[in-house]
Image (cartoon, grey):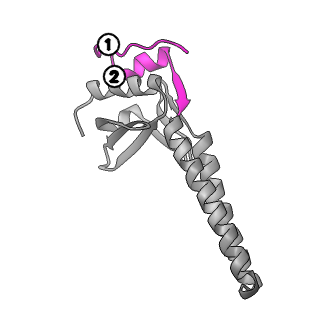
Amino acid sequence: MREFDPGKPTGHPRERFARQPITGPAYGLLMKGMATAVMIGIAFTSMRAFGQTSDLLDTNMRAGLAAVAALIFGSYCALLRSTMTIDGEGLRQSWMAKRRIRWDEIEAMRFVRMHGGARLLVKLSDGRVVAMNAGSDLLSRAFELMSRWYPVA
């Protein structure tokens, strides 16, 4: 893993990350582990409930439950595979829907350290606030650097 020292904000993050782009997981091991535990719990509870009520459910109800299960499993897989990238263009995070923020859209930021990772709250020029997640120490340090450059959101 590359070393990254946020240091003092000497130049705009756009130039710094254009020279040295950073990509890493959007969610840390703690968050992924908690999501896995919840998925296992949902699976066992669902199988038990389905086994007890299967004779009461018609075909449409079974199809609806299968669709819900597919959506939950899809969001779980997206959480496990999601990535965060910071480069010369801006910030990108993949998950169920991709988030993309260009440097010129950013008005203010706030760095929030949490258990299982860090979060960067970004206030955009149109007034929206977007949360970006960091699942590695490298991304957390990069978030910290960026939050020093911009005003606090």
Disc 1 to disc 2, C-alpha distance: 7 Å
Residue at image point 22% right, 32% down: 151
Residue 99 position within the rendered picture, expressed as x and y whole percent measured from the top left: 49, 44
Q: Amino acid at mark 2?
A: Leu
With 141 as the anchor, is 149 left or right in this view? left
Q: Amino acid at mark 1?
A: Gly
Q: Quadrant of the C terminus?
A: top left
Q: Which mark is residue 25?
A: none
Q: Nearer the viewer, residue 14 or 145?
A: 145
Residue at image point 29% right, 49% down: 127
Q: Quadrant of the N terminus?
A: top right
With 68 as the anchor, is 33 left or right in this view? left
86 vs 92: above or below: above
Q: Could you tell me which secondary element the residue under label 2 belongs to? A: helix
Q: Are marks 1 and 2 in contact (CB under 8 Å)?
A: yes
Residue at image point 38% right, 28% down: 143
Residue 23 position within the rendered picture, expressed as x and y whole percent measured from the top left: 54, 26
Task: Assess whether residue 6 is covered by the magenta stretch.
Answer: yes
The residue wearing badge 1 is 7
Q: Could you tell me which secondary element the residue under label 1 belongs to? A: loop
148 vs 80: above or below: above
Which range is magenta?
A: 1-26
Q: Quadrant of residue 73?
A: bottom right
Residue 118 position within the rendered picture, expressed as x and y whole percent measured from the top left: 39, 35
The residue wearing badge 2 is 145
